[in-house]
Image (spheres, rainbow, N blue to C red):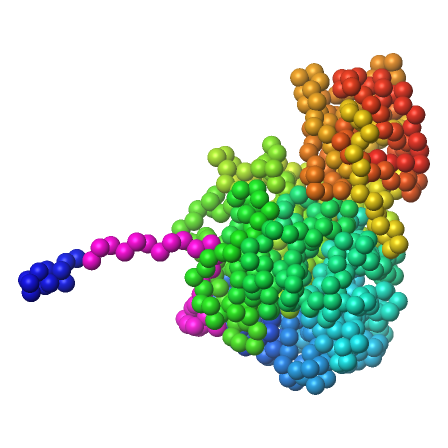
């Protein structure tokens, strides 16, 4: 018996099965200088920004006042203690934003009256490494006319909301009725207007219309986003949508009621809000973390700036709702994943085409992520997104993304970075100030059917700030990946869309991933593009501005909710838009088609399928349609409005009909000039046309110049 037992004890152990792979590819980063990985100290949120303009993202901890420099992706160095410039006590997050345009991002902290006893804003002006570092200016009345005081603020946001070239500061602040705060603040940047040509700020909170929504609980997250795709930056805060109605240099917002926006006024505290195109359909959705029912919630954008509360999409949506929120593609598959307190959720859109967030597995220590406040950045520039993991009141850690390592070949690193920049005579490189710029990566040959859109932001969920440059995960391909890039830069209402794409600069088209040495593409508002250190000039005479035909489709407005689309009254229904280029002296290029309702299935003509056809009807007895004027497009049945990037060239001196085969429609009144930039809108009609190869029924229709069934955005 002893021999038997001895044999059992001495028998070789069976090999251990390898640990199952986890969904979240993060592990603790360490170095000889930081052996425990606790680089950033005790904190309540971290801000990512390139404070010294050396091209490598740095990190600021507002709670300790410590500023950490990125040593070119190899290590971190504590370079400054800014706490003497800040108010004493516990400090929450901060946001980098270059308010004076000198190329060195400044800092705005988030006042915390309850924990500090005063709740005063600290605004740190970055003078650059040769100018003496930072100085505090919020207490100087000639720099900030009314200093925010007695505030309880979370998740500051920078953006140029009025189109004058200078970024404003929005502070989402607990309302005055809470008994210990003041309500939201908007500080307008007046530009360099002091005697010494320093930038100054003016409190325009009341006039701008950004006051706390009636009945809303305390705001703890906000974002500037172009929800309705009219070119300007709208605002989410306080369980409400604020529509941007600014004119040049005058910030103004209009609060939309729940019946108008679809965002419900629940009176429930949110612990963060962020926007992303989570379902990859081309518009930016709203994701909110509420501390009680409805818990983690998705408001899906219907394409027209109105929202539908999505249900049944988030597994165990009541988990992880205490503190902290962020959105990023941490597995680099192309869709946006979701992180809340202690919980990572994986987006399944790319994997199986489903609107579905599942609980992700991770090897991270539970105590590190219980009050997680992630700031995402590719700090080592290896292609995957690393995480400076803040932790509410506890130690922050640097987590490295292990998706790519030193052994990963360049072609296996499936990513590209895009950095929208504002041109500056003072800073030749350009400024990281284009907050709210929408960037789209379009794969060649139709790609995988998903649209890849991200936008720049200074507030990234809840008292955190991600890196300014945008990292896009790209799909594996049996051949080298080819893609194009377009950037929509924010403008003020009524000034169209400002789009820099391959029509403006051909360098943004047909980019081969395998040929890129530097994966960061820099796109400037003026049309210049930098790829692999080479600057490409835009085409002469091609404007980034896209005008709307007849003022474009109707937008939701206070007191004027949009009605839903209705089914077409007959089969083979075609919405028709009559156009004339007789007044044009150059080709007119239709670069976007906007349609309310739903397209019907494409039909065959001359061996090709199409549900959008452009007819040249200059000679109505012999209408013509070229192959490149026939499109087969698809609409999402959940959306009320769809936006399609196009490249339809209309020759000057001609008459045209654009026809779309629709299964549902919504008409809009023509609200603008019928003749703009050489293009004249003749009117619209809804026609039954069973002959997809013929235009006779379309030509015979009576066009109504007061109505639009769809609209075009065009340039020259």
Q: State the image quarter where residue 79 is shown.
A: bottom right
Q: How many labels does the image show?
A: 0
The percent coordinates of residue 569 (x first, y second) are 82, 29
Q: State the image quarter where residue 266 is shown.
A: bottom right
Instruction: Looking at the picture, tell me which residue is in the foreground, 412 or 615.
Output: 615
Instruction: Looking at the picture, tell me which residue is in the foreground, 221 or 67.
Output: 221
Task: Please name the predominant secondary structure of the magenta segment in the image.
Answer: loop
In the rendered view, does 75 fall on the left or right side of 115? left
Task: Let me know if residue 18 is in the magenta part.
Answer: yes
In this rendering, is residue 277 above or below 444? below
Residue at horizontal 48 percent and vertical 43 percent from the top:
411
Q: Is residue 529 visible?
A: no
Residue at horizontal 77 percent and vertical 46 percent from the top:
304
Q: Give the range drawn in magenta.
A: 13-38
The percent coordinates of residue 687 (x first, y second) are 84, 25
Quadrant that contains the C terminus:
top right
Instruction: Looking at the picture, tell me which residue is in the foreground, 431 or 1.
Output: 1
Q: Can residue 566 be seen in this view?
A: yes
In this rendering, is residue 206 above or below 475? below
Residue at horizontal 74 percent and vertical 51 percent from the top:
307
Task: Let me know if residue 556 is in the magenta part.
Answer: no
In the rendered view, does 474 fall on the left or right side of 86? left
Residue at horizontal 80 percent and vertical 31 percent from the top:
568
């Amino acid at each position: 018996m002893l021999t038997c037992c001895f044999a059992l004890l001495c028998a070789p152990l069976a090999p251990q099965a390898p640990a199952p792979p986890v969904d979240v590819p993060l592990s603790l980063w360490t170095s000889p200088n930081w052996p425990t990985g606790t680089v950033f100290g005790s904190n309540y949120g971290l801000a990512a920004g390139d404070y010294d303009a050396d091209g490598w993202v740095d990190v600021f901890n507002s709670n300790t006042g410590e500023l950490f420099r990125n040593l070119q992706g190899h290590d971190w160095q504590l370079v400054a203690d800014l706490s003497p410039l800040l108010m004493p006590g516990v400090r929450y997050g901060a946001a980098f934003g270059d308010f004076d345009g000198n190329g060195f991002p400044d800092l705005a902290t988030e006042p915390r009256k309850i924990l500090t006893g005063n709740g005063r804003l600290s605004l740190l002006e970055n003078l650059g490494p040769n100018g003496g570092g930072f100085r505090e200016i919020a207490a100087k009345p000639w720099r900030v006319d009314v200093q925010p005081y007695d505030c309880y603020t979370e998740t500051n946001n920078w953006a140029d909301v009025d189109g004058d070239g200078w970024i404003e500061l929005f502070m989402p602040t607990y309302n005055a009725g809470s008994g210990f705060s003041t309500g939201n603040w908007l500080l307008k940047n007046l530009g360099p207007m002091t005697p010494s040509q320093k930038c100054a700020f003016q409190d325009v909170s009341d006039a701008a219309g950004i006051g706390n929504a009636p009945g809303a609980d305390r705001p703890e997250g906000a974002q500037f986003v172009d929800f309705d795709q009219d070119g300007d930056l709208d605002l989410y805060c306080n369980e409400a949508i604020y529509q941007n109605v600014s004119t040049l240099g005058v910030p103004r917002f209009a609060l939309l009621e729940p019946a108008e926006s679809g965002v419900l006024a629940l009176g429930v505290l949110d612990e963060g809000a962020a926007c992303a195109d989570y379902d990859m359909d081309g518009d930016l959705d709203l994701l909110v973390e509420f501390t009680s029912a409805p818990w983690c919630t998705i408001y899906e954008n219907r394409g027209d700036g109105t929202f539908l509360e999505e249900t049944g999409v988030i597994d165990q949506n009541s988990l992880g709702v205490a503190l902290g929120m962020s959105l990023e593609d941490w597995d680099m598959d192309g869709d946006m994943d979701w992180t809340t307190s202690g919980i990572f959720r994986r987006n399944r859109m790319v994997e199986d085409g489903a609107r579905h967030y599942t609980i992700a597995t991770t090897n991270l220590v539970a105590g590190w992520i219980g009050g997680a406040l992630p700031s995402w950045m590719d700090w080592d520039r290896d292609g995957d997104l690393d995480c400076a993991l803040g932790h509410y009141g506890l130690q922050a850690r640097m987590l490295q993304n292990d998706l790519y390592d030193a052994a990963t070949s360049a072609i296996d690193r499936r990513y590209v970075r895009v950095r929208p920049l504002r041109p500056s005579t003072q800073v030749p490189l350009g400024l990281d100030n284009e907050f709210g710029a929408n960037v789209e990566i379009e794969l060649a040959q139709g790609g995988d059917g998903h649209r890849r859109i991200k936008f720049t932001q200074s507030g990234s969920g809840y008292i955190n700030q991600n890196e300014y440059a945008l990292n896009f995960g790209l799909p594996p391909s049996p051949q080298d990946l080819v893609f194009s890039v377009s950037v929509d830069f924010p403008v003020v209402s009524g000034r169209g869309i400002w789009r820099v794409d391959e029509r403006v600069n051909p360098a943004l088209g047909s980019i081969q991933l395998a040929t890129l040495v530097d994966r960061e593409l820099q796109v400037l508002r003026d049309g210049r593009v930098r790829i692999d250190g080479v600057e490409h000039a835009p085409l002469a005479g091609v404007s980034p501005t896209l005008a709307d035909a007849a003022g474009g489709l109707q937008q939701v407005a206070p007191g004027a909710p949009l009605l839903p689309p209705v089914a077409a009254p007959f089969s083979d229904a075609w919405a028709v838009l009559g156009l004339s280029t007789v007044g044009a002296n150059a080709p007119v290029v239709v670069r976007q088609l906007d349609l309310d309702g739903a397209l019907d299935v494409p039909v065959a003509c001359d061996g090709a399928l199409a549900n959008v056809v452009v007819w040249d009807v200059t000679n109505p007895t012999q209408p013509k349609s070229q192959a490149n004027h026939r499109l087969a497009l698809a609409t999402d049945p959940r959306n009320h409005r769809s936006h399609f990037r196009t490249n339809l060239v209309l020759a000057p001196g001609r008459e045209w009909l654009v026809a779309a085969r629709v299964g549902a429609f919504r008409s809009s009144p023509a609200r603008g000039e019928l003749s703009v930039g050489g293009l004249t809108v003749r009117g619209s009609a809804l026609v039954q046309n069973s002959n997809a190869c013929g235009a006779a029924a379309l030509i015979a229709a009576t066009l109504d110049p007061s109505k639009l069934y769809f609209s075009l955005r065009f340039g020259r």
